Amino acid sequence: MINLRLSGKLELDEAMFGGHRKGKRGWGAEGKTLVFGIYKRNGHVMTFPVPDRKYDTLMELIKKHTRKGSLYYTNDYTAYASLIMRGKHKVVSHGMDEYVRGDAHINGMEGFWSYAKTWMYHYRGVPKQYFHPYLKEIEFRFNNRNKNIFEMLVKMLVKPVPNE
């Protein structure tokens, strides 16, 4: 397995996946799957289903999958407060209705969430035990959006047999 570490301008965000349900909405909603994402601007996205939004959970993934010295863009969630120790950190305050300030925004990551939820909608429900592979398929499609995926898959599946 390749351990890809992203660097440069990185956007970090979390999202909830799951259909509409009665009861509590937002971060405390039951039956939803929480996903953390890292997006390299004009590049690749990496996604991880996570059990919670706690500092330790998110920082472990950030340390494992990003390089020190990167420029991190996040919202004002407190778990991101220590990112200044890893590199530069720019924050937009969604709580104060701020979504863009100069080049500080997480619109690329939020655009991926929209893309992923649109793909998931077509499946009309994914069993929880299969959510991760579906999410990784969508991540693959997004990361290869400018390539002919059919040709890529054919090359992966059909390997030339050496002459004997």
Image (cartoon, rainbow, N blue to C red):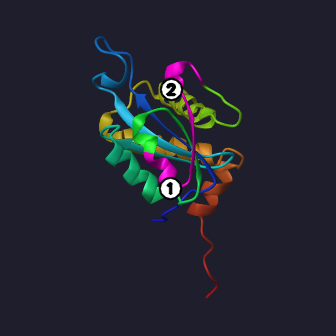
Residue projecting furthest to the top = 22
| Above/below status of 6 relative to 135 | below
Q: Amino acid at mark 2?
A: His
Q: Secondary structure at mark 1?
A: loop
Q: Secondary structure at mark 2?
A: helix
Residue 134 seen in the current view:
no
Residue 87 percent coordinates (x, y): 55, 54
Residue 150 seen in the current view:
yes
- How would you rate the neighbour count of disc 1 (Cα within 10 Å): few for under 14, some for 14-19, many for 20 or more? some
Q: Which residue is mark 1?
A: 86
Residue 100 percent coordinates (x, y): 65, 28
Q: Is residue 134 left or right of residue 152?
A: left
**Magenta stretch: includes residue 91:** yes
Q: Are marks 2 and 1 in contact (CB under 8 Å)?
A: no
- Please state the extent of the stretch shown in magenta in the rendering: 82-98
Quarter of the N terminus within the rendering: bottom left
Q: Which of pointers 2 and 1 lies earlier in the amino acid sequence?
A: 1
The residue that appears at 70% across and 49% down in the rendered structure is 148
The disc placed on residue 122 is 2
- How would you rate the neighbour count of disc 2 (Cα within 10 Å): few for under 14, some for 14-19, many for 20 or more? few
| Above/below status of 29 relative to 40 | above
**Magenta stretch: includes residue 65:** no
